[in-house]
Amino acid sequence: MIQIFGNSIPMAEKALDFLWSKQQVHSANLANVDTPGYKTKYVTFEETFRSKLKNAAVTGNRGLIGNAIESARWEVNDTRNETSRLDGNNVDADVEMVEVTRAALQYQYLLYSINSDHHRLQSVIKGQ
């Protein structure tokens, strides 16, 4: 079935993994909103992923595109220099709640999209 969808399933899997890690990082930020000295963490992935895919797509080699998807990784970074409170903590609970919610909605939408593709394929196979 993966061949039917090309690289879309591995790409969706990588995006789901990223969104899951993004939710975890922002949830950890929320959990540490009152921890003195805690610095907000964030996840980077989109730009690196886009760049890898763009470079692989230029070649036209589907194998390189698959390798680019497989090798893409996200990074957890922190904001060392930014401090908005006297205790050294820089977590903004409102921003973190928005990011957790955004990641959760993106995750749900992506799952819905994958399920929709799967159901369409099932309908075609069954001749419905």
Image (cartoon, grey):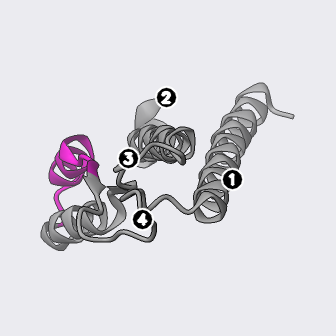
Outermost residue on the front side: it is: 86
Looking at this view, is 14 or 33 the one in front?
Answer: 33
Q: Which residues are magenta?
A: 60-76
Question: What residue did someone put label 3 on?
Answer: 7
Answer left or right for 63 relative to 91. Answer: left
How many angstroms separate mark 3 from mark 2 (CA)?
11 Å
How many angstroms separate mark 3 from mark 4 (CA)?
48 Å
Q: Amino acid type of disc 1? A: Thr
4 or 2: tag closer to the N-terminus: 2
3 or 4: tag closer to the N-terminus: 3
Task: Judge depth for marks 3 and 4 and give the one in front.
Answer: 4
Q: Residue at x 23, y 54 (%)?
A: 65
Task: Judge depth for marks 3 and 2 and give the one in front.
Answer: 3
Q: Residue at x 70, y 52 (%)?
A: 105
Q: Amino acid type of disc 2? A: Met
3 or 2: tag closer to the N-terminus: 2
Question: What residue did someone put label 2 on?
Answer: 1
Residue 101, label in figure: 1
